[in-house]
Amino acid sequence: MNTLLSDTLGFVAWREAQQAAVEHALSGWVPLDAPAGLGEAMRYAVLDGGKRLRPLLVLATSAAVNGAPGAAMRAACAVELIHAYSLVHDDMPCMDNDVLRRGKPTVHVKFGEAQALLAGDALQALAFELLVPGDGSLEADMSVALCRLLALSAGAAGMAGGQAVDLASVGVALDQAALEAMHRQKTGALLQASVMMGAATGQTSEATRAQLARYGASLGLAFQVVDDILDVTADSATLGKTAGKDAACDKPTFVSLMGLDQAQAYADRVLDQAHEALRHSDLTHTDTLHALADWVGRRAH
Amino acid sequence: MNTLLSDTLGFVAWREAQQAAVEHALSGWVPLDAPAGLGEAMRYAVLDGGKRLRPLLVLATSAAVNGAPGAAMRAACAVELIHAYSLVHDDMPCMDNDVLRRGKPTVHVKFGEAQALLAGDALQALAFELLVPGDGSLEADMSVALCRLLALSAGAAGMAGGQAVDLASVGVALDQAALEAMHRQKTGALLQASVMMGAATGQTSEATRAQLARYGASLGLAFQVVDDILDVTADSATLGKTAGKDAACDKPTFVSLMGLDQAQAYADRVLDQAHEALRHSDLTHTDTLHALADWVGRRAH
């Protein structure tokens, strides 16, 4: 067996074990007993779906900095709850009006719009609740650092702000800089925060945190370029969501801006920067972080 | 001047000064520069409106326990941001479909549904951001305690859960216990959390925290009974929102359950319990908390 194949198998085993652990933790934390169907809608939105890229970034970074595993799992689930709530709200009729997500009817299709709105709201609150356990299992300083990273990446300066720009961009010819700025907020902020929250569960030098921030930013940008590529090359069944949606909505994408081949080359170039950032850090166990960057890129091939 | 009148004037002066201080702090914290109109929608939702009851409860409780003023103002604004976001989402067409709030068009009427959804989401994130300032101005233990109180009161076990029950209760004959359970979550949890967050900015005995929790719960219940009374006795101009809405929607209320006179007597009785809880605490400076309970009751007379 050559080294590449062995590494890949090691990564796949790690990834599947972590995905199962995240699923288990989320299932314990997203309430069964929330009243009047709210718990069902929350669990439907969160469980049994998605690649869990953000939790994997948290967990891999935490492992690379020798972070506290309990804190890492809470942070991993908190980020995923923010991501899940954003999908629920994003799919609603007043936003993207999507009926399919992860191969299943979207939350508002299944539970109604009002319940979808409330489930998203409650998932955001739950994300922060996970970071302040109240049982002494997380050091207060670490809780505060994690809450701050999450709040900044989710709010007006991050994801919500990016979505507002996205809304305003339909039918508008954005140049590459404007498109990247929008995605840096809309999807990049939470992906980068996943890396930085992983880092916050352990001790790191300021220089390494800066390289991890570069890694997270590059990975976040590459993720979006690949997403745009998949929107035109994959079908809905493979994506688990409606394909060709961006073009149909006249939304600017990296593919509409630079064409398919150039977009592919650009994704590879940006991922190289992610790998390079890791090599410039003083971390020694970065295999999984490298593999995660490769994994993001591989979706497009 | 008799004592009662002098006390009332003292309270009015305190209240107006604190309302102005909260307005000033919120104006500094709710971003001007959020992209693509998001900041305008957030500011419209939060500034220049409302009685600021929740912030006043935080500030008065903090003063009663000799709490840290900087922490109290952050907590006061955080609670108000959660309240403001809940109103924005609650007014949306898929929820209560209200067009008037605080005498102005609701956020979705003025900015569109998608922007209202995002503004609410971003306000919730901002609420938590305020509690983890990152500049060392708040002790980490206090930040964590405040975040936990806020997350629990806003989420599925609190406000969002209560709203889900409320949605499911249209046209349903709730008895008094079920109606109170619903309101304990929907509006009571955040009002009680306001009191407990104020307490968390200082040092209190466990016994006093228990009495403050009773005070907050009673005040929260009284607030809702009074709200139901006003829904039938006041006009839209006075309320600043659509009057007679609950009856029109066939929602169960304390007035529909017990009649107007009995509801009034019940509000008074519950407020007596709030006053009593304060008298049973070991706090010495509770005048303002008593006055706030009176103020909640006075709206109904």
Image (cartoon, coloured by chain):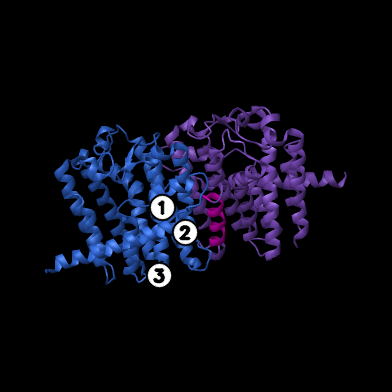
Chain colours: A purple, B blue
Which of these two is toward me, A11 or B12? B12
Q: Is residue B19 visible?
A: yes
Of all chains, the one bearing label 3 is B
Residues tagged by mark 1 and mark 3 found on one chain of the structure: yes
Amino acid type, residue under disc 1 in the picture: Leu
Taking the spot 58% from the left edge, 35% from the top edge, the residue there is A172
Answer left or right for B50 relative to A91: left
Tag on residue A151? Answer: none
Secondary element at tag 1: helix
Taking the spot 54% from the left edge, 49% from the top edge, the residue there is A154
- Magenta highlight range: A143-156
Is residue B231 rendered magenta in the image?
A: no
Which of these two is toward me, B110 or B273? B110
Q: Residues within 10 Å of mark 2 (few under 14, many from 20)?
A: many
How would you classify the magenta stretch by its main secondary structure? helix
Whether tag 1 and tag 2 are in contact, CB under 8 A, the answer is yes
Q: In 3D space, how far apart are the residues under numbered discs 3 and 2 (Cα atoms)?
A: 15 Å
Taking the spot 75% from the left edge, 45% from the top edge, the residue there is A294
| Image spot of residue B65 (x, y percent) | 34, 70
Q: Which residue is mark 1?
A: B81
Q: Which residue is mark 3?
A: B68
Which badge, 3 or 2, comes first in the chain's sequence?
3
Mark nearest the camera among 1 and 3 is: 1
Q: Which residue is mark 2?
A: B130
Q: In 3D space, how far apart are the residues under numbered discs 1 and 3 (Cα atoms)?
A: 20 Å
Instruction: Give residue B276's quadrant in the image.
Output: bottom left
Whether tag 3 and tag 2 are in contact, CB under 8 A, the answer is no
Secondary element at tag 3: loop
Q: Is residue B158 visible?
A: no
Which badge, 1 or 3, comes first in the chain's sequence?
3
Of all chains, the one bearing label 1 is B
Whether tag 1 and tag 3 are in contact, CB under 8 A, the answer is no
